[in-house]
Amino acid sequence: KQEVTQIPAALSVPEGENLVLNCSFTDSAIYNLQWFRQDPGKGLTSLLLIQSSQREQTSGRLNASLDKSSGRSTLYIAASQPGDSATYLCAVSPKRNNAGNMLTFGGGTRLMVKP
Amino acid sequence: DVKVTQSSRYLVKRTGEKVFLECVQDMDHENMFWYRQDPGLGLRLIYFSYDVKMKEKGDIPEGYSVSREKKERFSLILESASTNQTSMYLCASIEQWGIDSNQPQHFGDGTRLSIL
């Protein structure tokens, strides 16, 4: 069974720092990996989706990488801002018994960026 | 932009009640999902639907059922609510079913359900 782990569970940094969030998964047979953002009391907003054949995706100050063979992904946030404070979740779409749209989520990293 | 709307942000019900959570999406998506989110357990899939009147069990379907009579609406039903069903419930949708569908899921804002 696919398991997704995110480290650290919580992170507090001063504004302006570059930071890396980590995600690991146990089964490399995946269709894609996605990073989401969740603000308190809200739903999830998709940030980046990396297909299994890709190595990375970029959107503005965000860069996500995927190393499928080692079961790892990182989300890099450049020049962090207080508005980046949120919980970041990674999710994989496992191939086993799945046509591609079901997701397995990690527990999330709660980020706080201090002014 | 895709909009996924959950009918209630907060809901308080009593044990034994039959509870309905409603979700509507406005982009003609084929696939819809119900998750629950609990501290320390993350998001877990309860049920999903890939077409009208079609449904599949997710990881934790026990105690729940679903209904999809129209493409845009997906309802989660707690047949007899229990206190261990107190949770945040999230609905999501995605356009296509299949391995070529490398699209993100779109989520609603969630319903925080308390069972007393």
Image (tube, helix red, strand yellow):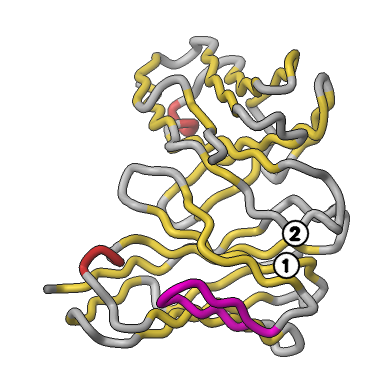
Q: Position of residue B48 (x, y in %)?
A: 73, 36
Q: Which residue is more in the foreground, A8 or B54?
A: B54
Count of residue discs: 2
Is B55 placed above or below A19 here? above
Secondary structure under the numbered disc 1 in the rendered image: strand
Q: Nearer the viewer, residue A48 or B42?
A: A48
Judging from the image, mark 1 belongs to the subunit labelled A
Say which residue label 1 marks.
A32
Residue B88 location, x and y as percent?
A: 44, 38
Span shown in magenta: A55-65
In the displayed orientation, state which residue is furthest to the left.
A115
Q: Is residue B49 magenta?
A: no
Marks 1 and 2 on same chain: no
Asked if residue A14 lies left or right of residue B49, the reply is left
Residue occupying the point 86% across, 57% down? B99
Indicate the chain on which mark 2 is placed.
B
Identify residue for label 2.
B102
Which of the two residues, A56 or B87, is positioned nearer the viewer here?
A: A56
The reply to whether the C-beta atoms of the residues labelled 1 and 2 are less than 8 Å apart is yes
Q: Position of residue A21 (x, y in %)?
A: 44, 79
Q: What residue do we see at 39% from left, 79% from top?
A: A77
Residue type for callout 2: Asn
Q: Please name the amino acid that badge 1 sits on.
A: Asn
Q: Dot 1, how many residues are within 10 Å of its Cα: few (below 14), some (14-19), or many (20+)?
A: many
Residue A4, label in figure: none
Quadrant of the rendering where the N terminus of chain A is positioned: bottom right
